[in-house]
Amino acid sequence: MSQDASTPSRPVPITDPATAPFWKAASQGELSLPRCEDCRRVHYYPRAVCPHCSSESLSWETLSGRGTIYSWTVSRRPAGAGFKPYVPYVVALIDLDEGARMLSNVRTDDVDSVAIGQAVRVDFEDMAEDIALPVFRPA
Amino acid sequence: MTREVVIAGISEAGLDKGVFAEPVSVLDVQAQCATRAVADAGLTMADVDGVLTAGLWGMPGAGTLMPLSVVEHLGIKPRFIDGTNIGGSAFDAHVAHAAMAIERGYCDVAVITYASDQRSASGRNLAGKPPHLNMQFDSPFGLLTPIGSYALAAHRHMHEYGTTSEQLAEIAVAARRWAQLNPAATKRDELSVDDVLDSAMISDPLHKLDACLVTDGGGAVVVTTPEKLGTDARKKAVYVRGYGESVSHWTINSMPDLTTTPAAHSGPAAMRMAGVSHDDFDVVQIYDSFTITVLLTLEALGFCKPGEGGEFVSGGRIAPGGAFPMNTSGGGLSCSHPGMYGMFLLFEAVRQLRGDAGERQLDKATTALVNGTGGGLSSTATCVLSNR
Ligand SMILES: [Zn+2]
């Protein structure tokens, strides 16, 4: 799965002020999301306004990094050249213990062993300065 | 002021093996089909004062402000313009928007246009979504677009209800059997459940033959009020009795419940407006980007209970001769799928209600339901149509 300079990379997130802290925290090995100070819910993806109650009172919180698989699929072909080294790879929706749901990858040597309800734990893959991709592994 | 609203004209660009039969640009296809659809309604382009359009062509470039390019190419000056683009359901939503404008007298004759040369020009690359804004949380993970979102929904449905790949395959097989009755359909050779299950796995649990075709396509639909029509056009006009639309998300991480599509909102809204219930429909046209799209939509619309979709589509019920005539052209799975299929649902509903469907014509076709789905199960638009 290692990539040399000639290999096209996966799409690197183009961050904005509301999302940069998420990617930066990931680059420091933490999964962090905004929690709403009004409705107390965590949301994904990070926004400047709470999608649950429209509050602008949000504060960043470091999460446990634990979750369960809500659903999953295996990409049997690459979604662009940067994904060729990963095929076949698992893309899954992860229900985080703190309540938000995120799309991510589940890294495993056995893609057929993945199941809904499976416990997973976050891991991070460096992508660029201040940007790492949160992925998950079976817990 | 409320006026009755009808679909009075349709025109669909001809295909040969999935590509435009006559080589033509996406703008010219729309101008040709608009002109022919207007003629089908016994009108001329000079009568058109509303234009609605959506597509995926010409971006960045001529398609970025799509309605401007289309209106310019048609050479008219409409007073009602709508470029709502919510994916493949857009054209079914356009019927609703045109109806509201016509009911109020905001315009009299609206034409809805669409074209895609994705097959001949290989013009579609949805995987190339730049990873910014909401897509920065989608593109870096390599979900295949659009099949990956539908695959996630399929796995979840299987988990919750025990739905099987065989049941999904029945939907593709039924579509093929309808296509065999439609000389204009792209795929007409024999297809079995095993053929679907044996086709390449693309995004588990969806196979290549769980997915729609990739073809060119284009067309136009004329929406107006009966008072604008001559006697002949009025006879074959199809009434727009109800409509509804709904959007819940774009990126799949924001879909609240992967087994419930927004049709759970748009469907009841359209049926309520029309004053009809499920038993009133003689034929339904359900967006079939993937087999799972159909199953989820039938449940969301309430034709069966959540979890019963697999059984509902099995045993040939949705195939020719079955109790539930559906996607009678062969659908996106076997007839054509230019990327945004919602207009083609309208074409087939109108043909059935006019009695113009040839060998596949149903004996009784008075009331039809059309339900488009766009994005990644993101948007739906439902129309209730009847020929009286
Ligand atoms: Zn809130």
Image (cartoon, rainbow, N blue to C red):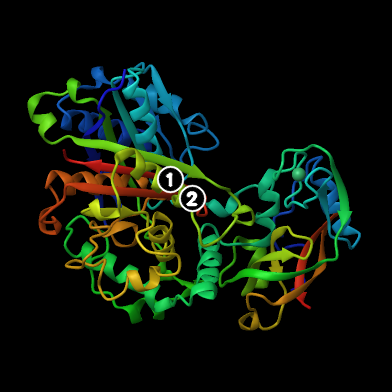
Q: Along the line of sight, which residue is nearer the eye, B87 or A118?
A: A118
Q: Is residue B46 left or right of residue B127?
A: left
Report x, y in % for residue B186. Answer: 26, 59
> In this picture, is B46 found above or below B30?
above
How many neighbours does mark 2 have within 10 angstroms: few (below 14), some (14-19), or many (20 or more)? many
Per the rendering, the mark at residue B262 is: 2
Residue at 37% in and 34% down: B96
Report x, y in % for residue A68. Answer: 71, 71
Report x, y in % for residue B375. Answer: 50, 50
Label 1 residue SS: helix
Q: Is residue B109 left or right of residue A81?
A: left
Q: CA distance from mark 2 to mark 1?
A: 6 Å
Type of amino acid at the residue the image marks with label 2? Pro
Report x, y in % for residue B369. Answer: 29, 49
Residue at 82% in and 49% down: A34
Residue where numbered disc 1 is placed: B266
Circles 2 and 1: CB atoms closer than 8 Å: yes
Type of amino acid at the residue the image marks with label 1? Ser
Q: How many marks?
A: 2
Query: Mark 2 belongs to which subunit?
Result: B
